[in-house]
Amino acid sequence: MNPSVKLKFAERYGSEPLIIHAPGRINLIGEHTDYNDGFVMPAAIHMGVQFAFAPSQAAETSIYSLKYDEAFRVDLSKPGKVAQPGWANYFLGILHQLNERGLKTGNFNCVFDGDLPTGAGLSSSAAMECGFVFGLNELFKLGLTRLEMIHMAQWAEHHYAGVKCGIMDQFSSMMGKENHAFMLDCRSLEYEYLPLSLGDYTLLLCDTNVKHALSSSEYNTRRNECQQGVAVIAQKYPEVKSLRDLTAAMLPEFKDELPGVIYNRCRFVVEENNRVVEAGKDLKRGDLVAFGKKMFAAHEGLSKLYEVSCEELDFLVELAKESNGILGARMIGGGFGGCTLNLIRGSVVPSLVKSAGLAYYNRFGVEMTHYAVSPGKGTSGVAGYRSNSLNDYIDWVGVKSIYRITMQGRIYTTYIMKKALHLQSFLSGWPDSN
Ligand code: ADP
Ligand code: MG
């Protein structure tokens, strides 16, 4: 936990703040499937964005970024988009949503900072949105559910950051659970927590430290290509509303009807959705070897069929294939740069990082950085925090009730046993006493 937001808050505003942590996320498998209504398998990670909040009597709201040492003041009645600072837009989008829903907050002060690398595909932007809306919900008792906050955060990303992302990032940041990943159905938003028992293995991100300019334009192009595929397929199968509905059995029928590129995009999405479902079974069985193979297969598809990889990512995944102690590796995120995710034996991490870093530098003249990540919990309050949200309250009441029933059960059981013993001795003593 980052203690600096609390210290900075005390220094700037002199009051005791509410502290919130919102995590970033990794996606174990299921890339580019979210906007096709498919399956993903994300996990919140231990790194994230931390916030300190407290109500303010001032005429304006003040938000301070520790990372950029920059303050931003906002009139809550006019949270329009701004050119600078870019980071403020994530918050302004949330404030706009609160106004739209008629939810009133008073002015407040906020200090925030993060230990997540930004722009590395770990969704620092979702952590910004989720932590901010969660904090305001707590501070002003707005009564928003986690699901409502997820949708508000996604809206802010779409409309204030201009990134038409699926729901996965915000969902993961809000709903993560320690030592678990989860399988999320991006259409119904049904989800299932999956145990991540990694044993000797660990999750290692290798950052290419490149972001090719193509990334956002190609992201939108892929979305369009998928829609083009659906438009053709739906003429024959009207029940196909998105690529989620396309099955492996239907696919060959469209080999000649779809342009080659569109066919490949469709094929990748069908295969990737199946991989996620099968990978979920691997995790439940604790079969990390099978899981790792699917990671390599996913990368192959992303690189060859969906064409969102790049030389740097392919290079690191090829190195991983040749290295002992790595069960699987693949690019994560939108593509064209960012990180690879490696399922790697903990003991070989130092040697791998050294050799891969050197080979990568020799080939591209760029440093490779790395982060070991562990699955962490979703957006939540920190240290001495008491939740106001109904969901969390129900959780808390649930736990209390189970405890109370168990304790009462124990008391009653003891009571009944005592009575039974009493009765037994009474009955057994009956003839004597006569
Ligand atoms: P990603 O979500 O993959 O990290 P994005 O480009 O979507 O990448 O979001 C990164 C942006 O989020 C940064 O450019 C910055 O505006 C904002 N951001 C994230 N973390 C912080 C932080 N700790 N302090 C200030 N701004 C941040
Ligand atoms: Mg982002």
Image (cartoon, rainbow, N blue to C red):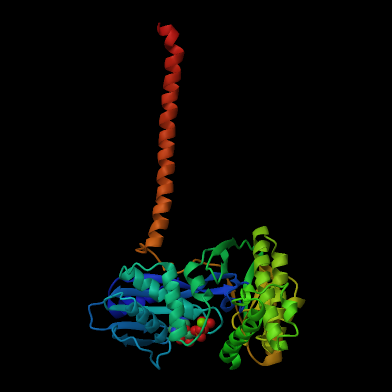
Q: Position of residue 318 (x, y in %)?
A: 74, 81
Point out the image quarter for the N terminus.
Answer: bottom left
Q: Residue at x 73, y 70 (%)?
A: 293
Residue visible at 74% across and 78% down in the picture = 253
Q: Horizontally, is 107 left or right of 196 in the view?
A: left
Q: Is residue 325 left or right of residue 219?
A: right
Where's residue 23, x and y in %? 49, 72
Q: Position of residue 100 (x, y in %)?
A: 34, 79
Q: Quadrant of residue 292?
A: bottom right
Q: Nearer the viewer, residue 141 or 109?
A: 141
Q: Please say whether residue 2 is visible from this viewpoint.
A: no
Relative side of 64 to 107, left or right: right
Q: Give the answer, above or below, for where 20 lies relative to 72.
A: above
- Residue at the outermost right position: 322
Q: Is residue 41 above or below residue 252?
A: above
Rendered location of residue 97, percent (x, y): 37, 79
Q: Residue furthest top?
A: 434
Q: Quadrant of the C terminus?
A: top left
Q: Is residue 56 left or right of residue 405?
A: left
Identify which residue is drawn at 40% across, 48% down: 401
